[in-house]
Image (cartoon, helix red, strand yellow):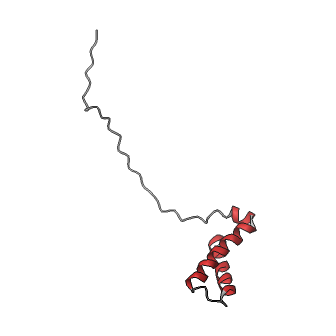
Amino acid sequence: MTTTTRKKTGGRRRAAATKTTRKYTKPTKPDTSLIESSPDERWKVIAVAAYHKAEKRGFDQGGEFQDWIEAEKEIDALLFG
């Protein structure tokens, strides 16, 4: 009969330490496939942005068109660069 001796580790196993190096990666453009495939979805996002612009100016009448144009430019810049 052969006996082997084992080292006691206190019931815990040690994980091998590995060094990982992370490189900076440039952020990619957001996936616009949903927006590109659905003009209705793009319209909804612009409508929400325009609403928030109107809310910031106190919903005063006369600025709705300008709110929409600004929102449309901002959303298109975010989605399509």
> Is the residue 53 above or below the residue 24 in the image?
below
The location of residue 7, given as percent across then percent down, is 25, 28
* Apparent side of residue 36 relative to residue 20 in the rendered image (left or right): right
Quadrant of the rendered structure where residue 31 is?
A: bottom right
Furthest residue in direction top, as rendered: 1
Q: Residue at 68% across / 83% down in the picture?
A: 69
Quadrant containing the N terminus is top left
Residue 25 screen position, x and y as percent: 51, 62
x and y, in percent, of residue 26 in the image = 53, 65
Q: Quick one: 53 or 36, which is closer to the camera?
A: 53
* Residue 36: quarter of image: bottom right
Report how many numbered discs are placed on residues in the image: 0
Closest to the observer, 10 or 24 = 10
Q: Is residue 74 above or below residue 18?
A: below
Q: Is residue 14 left or right of residue 73?
A: left
Classify residue 17 by image quadrant: top left
- At horizontal 25% and vertical 32% (from top left) the residue drawn is 10
Q: What is the x, y in percent for residue 33? A: 70, 62
Q: Residue at x 35, y 40 (%)?
A: 15
**Residue occupying image coordinates x 67% and y 64%:** 32
